[in-house]
Image (tube, rainbow, N blue to C red):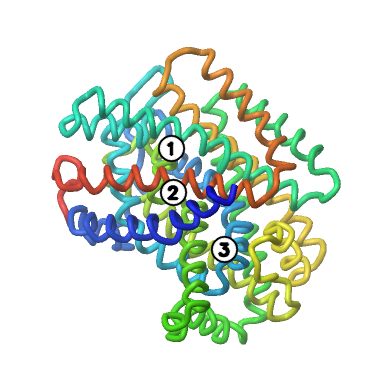
Amino acid sequence: MPLFSAFASVLGSVLVPGTLAASSILILPRVGRRNVFSPVTTLRRLCEKPDGNGTHPLAALSVALAGTLGVGNITGVASALMSGGPGALFWMWIGALLVLPVKYLEVRLAVLCRRRDAGGYCGGAMYVLRDGLADLAGPGKAAAAGGVFALLCCLNSLVTGNIVQANAAACVLTSDRRLLCGIALGILVLVSVLCGTRRIERITSCVIPLLTGFYIIVCLHVILPNRVLLPWIFKTVLLSALSPRAAMGAAMGFSVRQAVRFGVMRGIFSNEAGCGTSPTAHAAADTQSPDHQASLGVAEVVFDTLVLCTLTGLVLLIADIRWGVLPWHETADAASVSMEAFSKASGATVASLIRLSVLLFAYSSIIAQFYYGMTAIRYLTKRKTAAILYGLASSVCPVIGAVIPAGMMWVGADLLLGSMTLINCSALVYLSRSARWAGTPR
């Protein structure tokens, strides 16, 4: 366990941030700054109509958001702040801006490389690796690379997309009946699995907008009355992330390193940009062009991290100033700390509603991640036995997640997300060299 933890630390603090930064710098001029950073272009594309009668682009966006919103925005932010200090919030912002070109290209390629089957479109990073790298490595090796990514995607859906979500929901709802909570969540997941992927799209497109609107209102209810604290909070965040003393002293340098690690990695956990999972949902959309759906991917990251994660971070820091709720160490339970912050800042009734929201967010995230994992299974094999076993595993993992130690869980999540990000970004940089894949910059 210490060896895995050390590797996860190096992966999260050096390799992943460096890879994302280099990839973004190389990809941005090839896809065009206007495509990535123009709010007008993004908003115009949000209003596009689907070509056929399949999945609406906004429904595909809802599935992608279901896999990112919720637990990542609440417990993920709390975990980042406790482990990396207030400066982790700054690095979440930097990470979100940094990955926008990467997000744009990975969604664009997922739409270009998708396939149509009896249930509609299917695609994802594994198909991008298979089709995009065929000229470089040959069809066999490219398909094998896609297979490796598909296997990681399956494992990630069970760990990051299932066990982590169930653990947060169990910690938030109860401290002494976590196993019962895990069993209940597992039964709900099993019912959704039996209903099929179309029902998943309907559930997420209805649940996610309502939960998100409620969560924004609660956060603003806490932040606006305490707006006098905001200048001091933003100053603390910046100084914590960029203090000159941090670059001079070993201890302070380690602190900044931790802020970078947990800010970037929890940011990826929240918005999934660069790791290659959410393009699976975008690939299912009946969209007018790959560029239109790619713009929805950009909007997904902006809304998830720059808006919702910032709101959560401000609530937690306000609660810490008022009541000292944040223990500045990694071992505390992030879900419990988050709920204590909301309880003290907004009252017991609102905190209870937040607890229910976390359960629903966790549930929607699990079934969205099941959609990703099932797509990966179909890439690996057409046998129904594999799909059945994966469905059973997805129903059992909430029970495991409800009782597993948080430290072991987060190490596994960081290792999987980091490995997928390295593979995906390397392929994106290579493919961005061709106008066939990157498109015409605008």
Compare marks 1 and 2 and give the one earlier in the sequence. 1
Please state which of residues 49 and 134 is positioned toward the viewer in this rendering.
134
Q: Residue 189: image x %, image y %? A: 66, 31
Cβ–Cβ under 8 Å for marks 1 and 2: no
In three-dimensional space, the C-alpha distance between marks 2 and 3, rounded to whole angstroms, equals 16 Å
In three-dimensional space, the C-alpha distance between marks 1 and 3, rounded to whole angstroms, equals 26 Å
Amino acid type of the residue tagged 3 in the rendering? Ala
Q: Which residue is mark 2?
A: 418
Q: Quadrant of residue 214?
A: bottom right
Compare marks 1 and 3 and give the one earlier in the sequence. 3
Q: Residue at x 19, y 26 (%)?
A: 138
Q: Residue 179: image x %, image y %? A: 79, 38
Please state which of residues 121 and 129 is positioned toward the viewer in this rendering.
129
Give the crowd class for mark 1: few <14, some 14-19, many >=20 residues within 10 Å: many
Amino acid type of the residue tagged 2 in the rendering? Gly
Circle 3 — which element? helix
In three-dimensional space, the C-alpha distance between marks 1 and 2, rounded to whole angstroms, equals 20 Å
Q: Which residue is mark 3?
A: 80
Q: Which residue is mark 1?
A: 281
